[in-house]
Amino acid sequence: MSLLRPSNIDGAKYAGAILRLLVTRLRQAWPHVEILFRGDCAFARKRLLYWCEHHDVHYITGIAGNKRLRALGQALIEHAEKQYQETGTKQRLFSTFHYQANSWKQSRRVVIKVEHHDKGANFRCIITNLNHENPQYIYDHEYCPRGDMENGIKQLKLNFFSDRNSCHNFLANQFRVLLSSIAYILVNELRQTYLARTTLAKAYGGTIRLKLFKIGAIILTNSRRIQFLLSSYYPEQQLFTNVARQLMPP
């Protein structure tokens, strides 16, 4: 779901409403499905977390570090630094504890990652209601895949021009964003289903568009038919033919 918003409001302002719509629709189709909401620090909002906790939705988001969180993780920070000085190799340590901000009604689980290497220390925090997994697994396998989500957003902007909002009317720009999203979904389905065992199985949308869609052709028309004449020197003609045959109705 793609929503265009004004640039002068909180980036997470409509996240709760969109999440409610998506969860409702998903559970209509799959009543017992497990849902995980994942986001960066901008989505660590108390109302959003509270809603997830009371609607059986798992969440894992970044949380901005502060003096109190750093104090709670200080022992791990010092331990990582000590191990680095002793071994000379990069250290990557994890821990977990419960933390309650002043505006929260309850404490929540925080997972911290501490790295120490030749460039110094790196301290990161995430917040989650996942309680059955160890801290490193939660960070590496539940939170870090968010990076792949951001690659999808980058493709949406760079390859499908979702940020090209040059209309004067806001709703017109919202419609353009929806068209870009539909194009991304269709190309992604093409890649996952019909290009799975080809050289374009992991290609970006722009590469697929360049190699399979942007093809020069001569079009001949008469009263009975329309002909598309493609160049015999087109380098991807075998792949194009195979995909086109799969897309043809039975």
Image: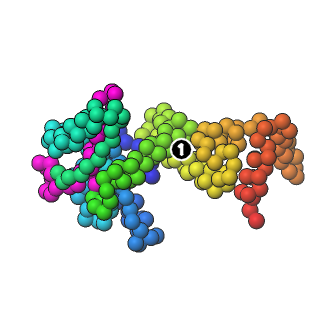
* Residue placed under numbered mark 1 in the picture: 180
User: Which residue is rendered at x = 34% and y = 51% of the image?
Assistant: 136
User: Which residue is rendered at x = 28% and y = 34% of the image?
Assistant: 86
Q: Position of residue 10 (x, y in %)?
A: 28, 41
Residue 140 appears in the picture as rendered? yes
The magenta segment: 100-128
Q: Dot 1: what SS?
A: helix
The answer to whether 118 appears left or right of 190 in the picture is left
The answer to whether 200 appears left or right of 222 in the picture is left
- Identify which residue, 142 or 58, lies in the foreground: 142
Q: Residues within 10 Å of mark 1 (few under 14, many from 20)?
A: many
- Identify which residue, 213 or 225, lies in the foreground: 213
User: Which residue is rendered at x = 23% and y = 58% of the image?
Assistant: 50
**Residue 54, relative to residue 64: is it above or below?**
below
**Residue 78, relative to residue 52: is it above or below?**
above
Query: How would you classify the magenta stretch by its main secondary structure?
Result: strand
Q: Quadrant of the C terminus?
A: bottom right
The answer to whether 148 appears left or right of 211 in the picture is left
Q: Position of residue 204 (x, y in %)?
A: 59, 41
Outermost residue, top direction? 119
Look at the image and say whether residue 183 sits in the magenta stretch. no
- The amino acid marked with disc number 1 is Ser
Q: Position of residue 63 (x, y in %)?
A: 26, 44
Residue 69 appears in the picture as rendered? no
